Amino acid sequence: MSPYRKIVHDLVEDLPEDKLRDAIEALEKISGTDQGTAWDLWGKLGEDAVEGAWPDASENHDAYLYRVKRF
């Protein structure tokens, strides 16, 4: 399995069923949209993020998002 497939597999595997269903529904809604609309949606990601939810988020970005350990 490629590293990218493993990352996606691990992320999806750890999602609660209701969150996975929501993510799939969101992807299905945008699957037929044009690129401009898709980029607009991409730009809105994180707008509702809670400040301070992860300590040292900038230093531990990869570990939090992709489970990549720092060396």
Image (cartoon, rainbow, N blue to C red):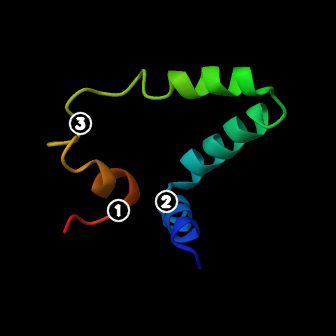
Q: Quick one: 12 or 21, which is closer to the camera?
A: 12
Which residue carries the number 2 mark?
11
User: For the residue labelled by badge 3, is the local secondary structure a helix, a strand or a loop?
Assistant: loop
Contact between labelled residues 3 and 2, with CB atoms less than 8 Å apart? no
SS class of the residue under badge 2? helix
| Residue extending farthest right | 32
Q: Is there a contact, CB below 8 Å, between mark 1 and mark 2?
A: yes
In the image, residue 37 above or below residue 28: above
Cα distance between the residues tagged 1 and 2: 9 Å
Task: Name which residue type carries label 3.
Answer: Ala
Lower sequence index among marks 1 and 2: 2
Pinpoint residue 65: horizontal percent, then vertical percent.
Answer: 37, 51
Quarter of the image containing the C terminus? bottom left
Q: Position of residue 13 (x, y in %)?
A: 53, 65
Among the 4 quarters of the image, the one containing residue 35: top right
* Total marks placed: 3
Q: Which mark is residue 67?
A: 1
Residue occupying the point 19% across, 31% down:
52
Question: Residue 25: x percent and y percent?
Answer: 71, 40
Q: Check if mark 1's residue and mark 3's residue have beta carbons within 8 Å.
A: no
Q: Which residue is mark 3?
A: 53
Q: Residue at position x 77%, y 40% from top?
A: 28
In the rendered image, the quadrant that contains the N terminus is bottom right
